[in-house]
Amino acid sequence: MPPTGTWAENTNLTGSRPPRAHDRRALGPERGRRRRRRWGEPMSQPSDIIDLVCQSKSLPALPATAMEVLRLTQSDRASADELAEVISHDPSLTAKLLKMVNSPLFGVRREVSSVQQAVAMAGQRAVRVTALSVSLTDMVKAQREDGFDFVSYWRSSLTTAVAGRLLAQSTAADLVDEAFVAGLLSQIGRLAAHRAIPERYAEVIAHREANGGRLRDAEREILGVTGAGIGRALLQKWSLPNAICAAVGACQGEGLLELPEPQQRLARLVHAAVVTADLFCSEIAAGALDQVKSVVRSCAGLGETELEAILTELDAHVRQAAADLSLEIGATADYSEIREQAAMELAMLSVQAEAERTATVSRAAEAEAEARRLNEEKKHIIEVASTDALTQIPNRAAFEKRLDEMLAGARRGGEIVGLLMLDVDHFKRFNDTHGHQAGDEVLRSVAAALRSACRGSAFAARWGGEEFIAVGEFGSESAALALAEKVRRAIESESVAWDGQTLAVTASVGVAVCRPDESPADAEALVAAADARLYDAKRAGRNRVAPAAA
């Protein structure tokens, strides 16, 4: 890891394409010069490229509503009524704004049905920035395709925006809206370059395909400037707030540490969001998962538990935001899939290395011994990949596999499958009052109690964050309920010693069952049913069990 906490400029752990043969002729002449430019020779100085893009007539003008919202953003005397009136004049913008504000990403407690309510519930600042995001999104959507991959563009931009907002919610609540809009605009420079200098940007794409590596490196090699640098200049031309312009310019980590501290706070969050999005959009290979998490924790100031929770819920929020903004983003990646791929890559690297060493063993007996050792090591790697690093109990991926197996077996054997979903009560208080290390110790204690209570009767795992889960086959529904109560009492009896204090821990448990006489069981529906009962237990006062619905 680099000491700055940003993604290493020379990292080789990317999801890049392998080099392949390609026509190396220049795609067009230099302006004002007869000779053709050599492959890889920058077109001109970075400032020339930036001026050429920003002054291009092929770029769209800002929508009138966006310009008016920007004017209000820059005015100290703008009122909430003025903002509501400007937005309400655009019915499409109003509808999308209300969908965004009512989404789980914003966390507004009751439904908002008007712009005035949105301002009152979410605040002027949040509504201004969200309206600007929606208006700029519609501006980009209106552009003709011209061979540009808008699906990938929106998948990357929206994943960055949602990741930025979730990271800010945990560490910098005053920056959640700016982190979202900066993430949404993080790729705007690439789109602008494609529009303004299409032949030159085609060279960037061709260079990347021929040589592999990351797109930003191809941009720097061919144009002398990255899409982030172009994006910053374009946003400055459009008079967006300086902090957002600076964050977009430094979103790849370049120049991040040279920014003044007020701007650097937002820029660090956006850089962490870009690295996260690169992982989820396969710009960075899944095998680099641990390095990515280290960079994100460093930039955003997050603990392991908080980051795991954000990564687990990221894909669902991205898909919801895409629906709210009517964006096509193609297939997305779930965090459990990325973790599984990372484990497989690690196992394959280990197997390949060991296979090469085994091939050098000359005698048959030595080769056989090496093969046995290799097999045991592979089993160990797979076991580690299916174990939660913090609590040392099975993780979500291992649980989902076991649940599928158990449901399939129950159909044949006529058993009742009981599923327990539990959540540590008031877990956030442990983190806020005693620190994240105390919170981690609470999670380890709960995991130990759960594993002990379920031994011999159910398969227990950590679901994510402060949520745990267990599944087993039972002779009756009352037996599943009895196990849930046993688990609850086991956790309640645990006491965590921390910094001279004793922390009391309790949990709420929801139970769902799959009966033999019911239609074929669906794993996702069973988990959702247990989750709903868990929240019934929370609403009923916590530290209790909510039985399965009749």
Image (spheres, helix red, strand yellow):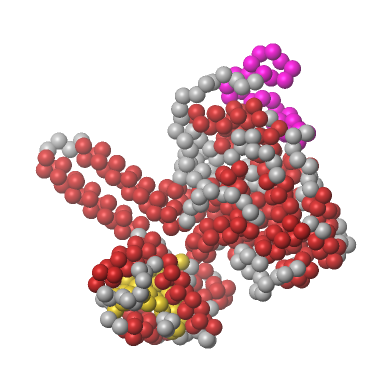
Pick the residue in front: 378 or 157: 157
User: Residue 218: in sight, yes or no?
Assistant: yes
* Magenta stretch encompasses residue 42: yes
User: Residue 3: in sight, yes or no?
Assistant: no
Q: Could you say where residue 455 lies in the image, as x and y percent from the top left? A: 29, 76
Q: Quadrant of residue 93?
A: bottom right
Which residue sits furthest right? 77
Q: Residue at x 82, y 49 (%)?
A: 64
Q: Quadrant of the C terminus?
A: bottom left
Taking the image as shown, residue 390 lies to the left or right of residue 429, namely left
Q: Residue at x 27, y 51 (%)?
A: 378
From the viewer's perspective, is residue 435 above or below residue 288?
below
Pick the residue in front: 463 or 506: 463
Q: Could you say where residue 372 lies in the image, as x and y percent from the top left? A: 18, 49
Q: Quadrant of residue 119?
A: bottom right
Q: Could you say where residue 156 lies in the image, as x and y percent from the top left? A: 58, 47
The region drawn magenta spans 29-56
From the viewer's perspective, is residue 100 above or below residue 204?
below
